[in-house]
Image (tube, rainbow, N blue to C red):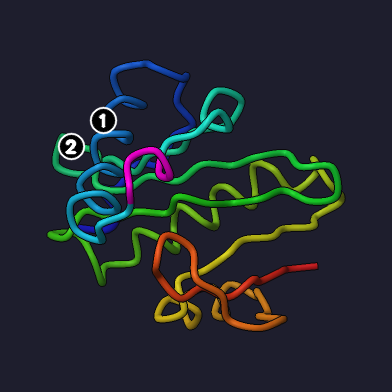
Amino acid sequence: MMNDVVILTVPLFSTLCNEGFKLRREVFIAEQKVPPDEEFDTYDLTAHHVVALAAGEVCGTLRVLHAEEHVKIGRVAVAMAWRGQGIASRMMDYAMTEHRAARGNRFYLTAQSDKVGLYERLGFVAYGDEFLDAGIPHLAMKNY
């Protein structure tokens, strides 16, 4: 089944990007109770939006920001029915390959603390103290 997953960068406000936004609403706002005004921000207007497609639907999404010192990956979400199948890892691999040259192969993210293992498997290292973001424990992580 995983071979049938396609990862794409999609234009802002395209049908596929909007489906990615819908998935973010489902995962972060409905499921994790993140306030809507914290989930969507002005960074969405300049981000590179990535979606995973499987069985005719958007099953995963993330966004990539080119910050001054590094590439920041965030808003990683996978639909409940597709979790545990490597979708997040595939999207991360894709995003890191596509944006490797942007900031000298320097990547940064803030991971929900219970997801740190996923990012460690991708070469990220946690640093600093745990902090709350939208009421959810997070750790800063870097890969460079």
Left/right of residue 87 with respect to residue 102 in the rendered view: left
Identify the residue at image location x=68%, y=80%: 125
Left/right of residue 73 with respect to residue 60 in the rendered view: right
- State the residue in front, 29 or 2: 29
User: Does the CB distance between marks 1 and 2 fall below 8 Å?
Assistant: yes
Secondary structure under the numbered disc 2 in the rendered image: strand
Left/right of residue 118 with respect to residue 126 in the rendered view: left
Disc 1 to disc 2, C-alpha distance: 8 Å
Secondary structure under the numbered disc 1 in the rendered image: helix
Left/right of residue 120 with respect to residue 107 in the rendered view: left
Q: In x, y percent, where is residue 102?
A: 79, 40
Amino acid at circle 2: Glu
* Picture layout, residue 6 above or below residue 111: above
The residue identified by callout 2 is 57
Identify the residue at image location x=65%, y=83%: 129
Amino acid at circle 1: Glu
User: Which part of the image, by quadrant, shows the C terminus?
Assistant: bottom right
Residue 46, picture quadrant: top right
Magenta part of the chain: 35-39
Q: In x, y percent, where is residue 113?
A: 46, 79
The 10 Å Cα crowd at callout 2, few under 14, some 14 to 19, many 20 or more, is: some
The answer to which of marks 1 and 2 sits earlier in the sequence is: 1
What kind of secondary structure does the magenta stretch mostly adopt? Answer: helix
Q: In x, y percent, where is residue 47?
A: 58, 31
Q: In x, y percent, where is residue 141?
A: 66, 71
The disc placed on residue 19 is: 1
Residue farthest to the top? 14
